[in-house]
Image (cartoon, rainbow, N blue to C red):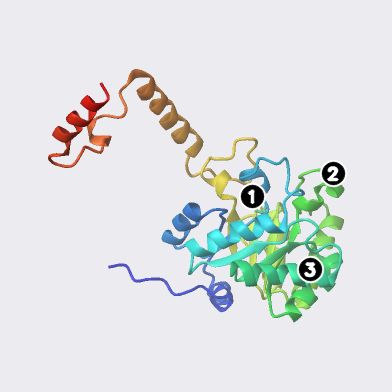
Amino acid sequence: MMEKRRKVTILDLYAMKERGEKISWLTAYDYPTAQFAEAASMDMILVGDSLGMCVYGYEGTVPVTMDQCIVHSEAVRRAAPTAFVIGDMPFMSYQASDEGAVLNAGRFLKEAGVDAIKLEGGVRVISRIRAILDAGIVVCGHIGLTPQSSGQLGGHKAQGRTVESARLLIEDALAIEEAGAQLLLLEAVPPEVARFITGKLSIPVLSIGAGPDCDGQLLIVSDMIGQFQAFTPKFVKKYANVAEVVTNAMKEYIKDVKAGAFPTDEHCYHMLKGEDEKFKDLIKEYE
Ligand code: KIV
């Protein structure tokens, strides 16, 4: 029998960086998907605000609310008791004040039972990071392409592609580690910049579109299994085509329903032994 996995902790993630074992990280937004990730022994799960696009069909992450993030994080936590689960702070849950940031980060722990929270930004959110850490909450920073501020970045564009922009990223990364954050995510950053930051920092540095040399990799599950169809970022590798599989299954179902080929006898509940004769009598009462 397969041994049940022990809960993954922040210390396990540090140890993985130390011994050079790559960390696997995937988003999940619902109970069944998180069950699959848990069964696959995924090290970390992010309940990303990408749920705005992947689950709700919004154009971006800005409309996503705290309440939505909490409901989805709760479901994921129930399904994945041993993975290291991170709740993603949605737009305007931390931008206004340190106090607001702490209260909302606290909701993720109290109401959804996650292990850590993630928030976007570098130097400009350092006081938020410090305040959340002071409340005893594990923090994952997120720099590079930060979708909540994609308006300021001029769209969903890779960052750090010029020396000046790379310098800003390095300064952000150093400030985040110095503030005490325990994890850092780099999104859409050239591999050479990501490699330098990963080597420079002692905390685990994860990549989504930041090349192979970070301490681990993150993908959005809906991209990775071929479910999200609006667009596919360059850094995605598709491991399945769920959209095709599910659409084909639905087409087959429609065909069977229209042709009367479903349901067949094997899908029916028959009357209990002896009841079928009595049922014939019952029908007669209505004739
Ligand atoms: O919301 C999310 O899934 C994210 C990733 C894009 C990094 O923040």
Q: Quadrant for residue 27, please give it.
A: bottom right
Q: Quadrant for residue 285, please give it.
A: top left
In the image, residue 53 above or below residue 164: above
In the image, residue 263 above or below residue 52: above
Q: Amino acid at mark 1?
A: Leu
Q: Amino acid at mark 3?
A: Ala
Q: Earlier in the sequence, mark 2 or mark 3?
A: 3
Q: Position of residue 88 (x, y in %)?
A: 68, 60
Residue at screen point 56% across, 45% down: 222
Label 2 vs label 1: CA separation?
A: 22 Å
200 or 208, nearer to the observer = 208
Q: Could you say which disc has been placed on residue 101 in the image? A: 3
229 or 94, nearer to the observer = 94
- Secondary element at tag 3: helix
Q: Position of residue 195 (x, y in %)?
A: 67, 62
Q: Position of residue 70 (x, y in %)?
A: 64, 61
Residue at screen point 34% across, 71% down: 3
Determine if the C-beta at disc 1 is less than 8 A from ligand 1: yes
Ligand 1 image position (quadrant): bottom right
Q: Which residue is mark 2?
A: 154
Q: Could you say which disc has been placed on residue 179 in the image? A: none
Q: Which residue is mark 1?
A: 51
228 or 249, nearer to the observer = 249
Say few, some or many: other residues with alpha carbon within 10 Å of mark 2 (under 14 / 14 to 19 / 20 or more): few
Image quarter hosting the C terminus:
top left
Q: Amino acid at mark 2?
A: Gly
Label 1 vs label 3: CA separation?
A: 20 Å
